[in-house]
Image (tube, rainbow, N blue to C red):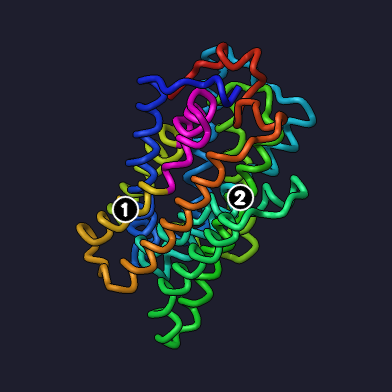
Amino acid sequence: MENKRKVTPAGLIHLFIVYFVWGSTYLAIRIGIRSGAGFEPFWFGGMRVITAGIILLVWGILRRKEIRPSKKDLLILIGSGFLLWIGGNGLVVWAEQQVNSSIAALVVATVPIWVAFLDSILDSRIPTLQVILSLFIGFLGIFILSLPVLTSGIRANLVSILALLLASFSWAAGLVLQTRHPVALSRGVSSGYQQLFGGIFFVVIALVVREPLPTPTTQAWLAWGYLVLFGSIIAFTSFVTALQILPTRLVTTYSFVNPVIAVSLGWLILGEPITYWTIAGGILVLIGVTGIYRASSVSKEPESRDQPEFGGSVQNNHQNSDTV
C-alpha cells in the first residue's frame, strides 16, 4: 500500500532514470520532427512505440510472464494507451513542429495539476483553496509562457500551445485511469501493451491524414532510436516500476525536474532562447505544481487508491519484479 512503501536505492535509481531520460526526450522529439528531418509526427511516434511495445512483449514472453490480459484489463490498456500515447505524447510530438522543446516541457509540467483536478471531480469533492490557487498560478504561468506566441500573430503556434495543454490533460487522464484501475500484469508487459496499442492508433492517424512515408536524416534516426530505447523501453518501464515500489508523491516529483533538464538541453544543444517570459512562466508553473504536491501530501487518499499503480494487486506486486 501507498503508506507502507519505503524509499529504496532500487526505487531511486528508477526515479532518477525518469528524471533525466524523460527530461531529454523533448529535445530528441524536436530533433526528430523538425523541418527537414524527414519524419512526420504520427509516423515518428507510431514507429517508436510499436517497436518498443513489441520488444517489451517479446521480453515478457522470454521471461515467461503472463501476457494474456483479462477483458477488463484489455480495455484499460487500450484506453490508457490512447490517452498516454496519442492524446499525451502524440500531441506533444505534433506541437513540437512549431514550438521549442523547452516550452513543450514547461506546459506538460502541469500534469499533476490536471491529476488533482480530475481526482476532485471523480471523488465528488470540492477542491481545497490551495488546489484552486495552485491551478490559477500554474495556468497563469502557461499564459505568460504563451505571450510571445500570442503576440507573434502566428496561428499555428497558438494551436500548438493549446495542443500541449490538451496533451497534459490526456496524460493526466491516463494516469488517473490506471491508478484507479490497476491491471494484473507485470510492469514490462503492461508497458508493452500500452505502447503497442498507442502505436496502432498512431499508424491509423498517419494513414488517415495521409502523412508521407518517412525519409529520415541520420540525426532523425538517432533521435528516434534514443526515444525507442531510452524513452519508451527504459524510462517508461522505470516510471511504471517507480510507481509500484516508491511513494506515489515522490514519483510525481519528476514533474519538477523534467522541465529544468529540457530547458537546459534545448538551450545548450539547439540554441533555444531562455527569455524572461520563459523564466517567469516556468517559475509560476512549478509553483503551481508545488502547491498541488503539498496539497496532496496532507490529504488522505481514498482506500481504493492504495493499490500499486500501473500493475497488479498488492499480492502479486512483489512477484512482478521485471525491469528492462
Q: Secondary structure at mark 1?
A: helix
241 relative to 38, above or below:
above
Quadrant containing the N terminus in the rendered view: top right
Going 54% across and 32% down the picture, which residue do you hit? 54
Between the residue at mark 2 and the residue at mark 1, the CA separation in whole angstroms equals 22 Å
Q: Earlier in the sequence, mark 2 or mark 1?
A: 2
| Nearer to us in this view, 68 or 164 | 164
Q: Are marks 2 and 1 in contact (CB under 8 Å)?
A: no
Q: Nearer the viewer, residue 77 or 149?
A: 149
Which residue is found at the position 37% from the left and 27% from the top? 12
Q: Position of residue 243 (x, y in %)?
A: 52, 30
Q: Nearer the viewer, residue 272 or 15?
A: 15
Residue range (magenta): 236-255
| Kind of residue sitting beneath label 2 | Ala
Pointer 1: what residue?
Answer: 260
Residue 216 appears in the figure:
no
- Percent of width and height locating residue 34: 36, 65
Please state if 99 lies on the left or on the right of 45 as rendered: left
Residue visible at 51% across and 63% down? 164
* Secondary structure beneath label 2: helix
Kindly report which numbered mark, 2 or 1, lies closer to the viewer in this rendering. 2
Can see residue 282?
A: yes
